[in-house]
Every structure is written in C-alpha cells, then in structure tokens.
Image (cartoon, helix red, strand yellow):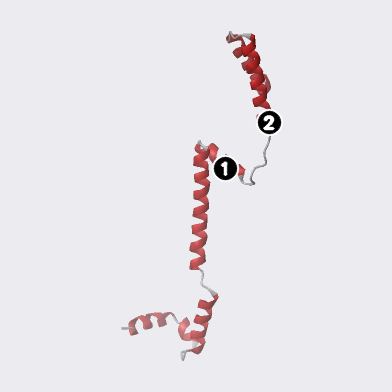
Amino acid sequence: MNEREFGHQIKQQLDRSLNLEPAVRDRLKVARERALVRQRVTEPAFALAWVDALVGRLSGSPASASIAVAGAGLILVLVALQYWQQTPSVEEIADIDTALLSSELPINAYLDKSFDTWLKRSQP
C-alpha cells in the first residue's frame, strides 16, 4: 500500500464517520482541494536548507534546528579565529630571522640544546 492509497482509505473512513449536510461536505471538499493546490506549489530554497532539515529531524523542532546551525557556525568561526591567531605572521618570522642573523652568536649556538638552559640560568 502506497501513501496515496493510505490517504484515500483514511479519507473514506473520515467521510463515513461524519454525518454532515451535503452543503457543508461540499464546502469542506472545496477547502481541501484549495489546500492541496497551495501545498503543491514549490518555492526555491536556500542551498543549505538540507542542513536545517537534517538538524530539525534530529532535534525535533525547526527553531532549535536554526539555533543548532547557528551554534555550529559560531564554533567553526571561533576555531578558525584561534588557529589564525596562533599562526605566526610573516613579520614575526622576519623579526626572528633578523635577530638570528644580526646576533653575535653563531647559529649553531641556538641549535645547541643546552643553550636554552644556559639562557634561563643567566637571566636574573
């Protein structure tokens, strides 16, 4: 049984259980047909509408789906901002290179593992 047959059976059961006047039944039929015509009109949706639909199914309501999508976007922006702040800029790298090249110590001294220990001891 497909959806159309199931809907037709439900309609027949509802029609049998109602004891309405023919004029009321006709008005209900016209209203039902108008509603079906309006329902079949499709509107273009935003490209990420499937995300909202998926989150809405998982969370239960469209309002909480919108909040969840906005929250996920905020978290993504915060992670990207944190990554961007931790990456050294070109100026910082250039300053380090300049300090190394203009220093009186040879570069091998900076590569020596005990040099870091010596620096920590020699600073007051």
Q: How many marks?
A: 2
Question: Vertical placement of 102 versus 42: above or below?
Answer: below
The residue at which mark 2 appears reads as: 40
Q: What label does residue 11 carry, if any?
A: none
Quadrant into which the N terminus falls: top right
Q: Nearer the viewer, residue 72 or 24?
A: 24
Q: What separation in Å lies between label 1 and label 2 (alpha carbons)?
A: 21 Å
Can you see residue 2? no
| Residue at (63, 17) in percent of width and height | 28
Q: Residue 73: horizontal and vertical position, in percent?
A: 53, 52
Q: Residue 27: horizontal and vertical position, in percent?
A: 64, 16
Q: Residue 87: horizontal and vertical position, in percent?
A: 51, 69
At label 2, the amino acid type is Arg
**In the displayed structure image, the side of residue 96 where residue 15 appears, left or right:** right
Mark 2 or mark 1, which is nearer the start of the sequence? 2
Can you see residue 120? yes
Q: Nearer the viewer, residue 27 or 2?
A: 27
Question: Vertical placement of 105 versus 27: above or below?
Answer: below
The residue at which mark 1 appears reads as: 52
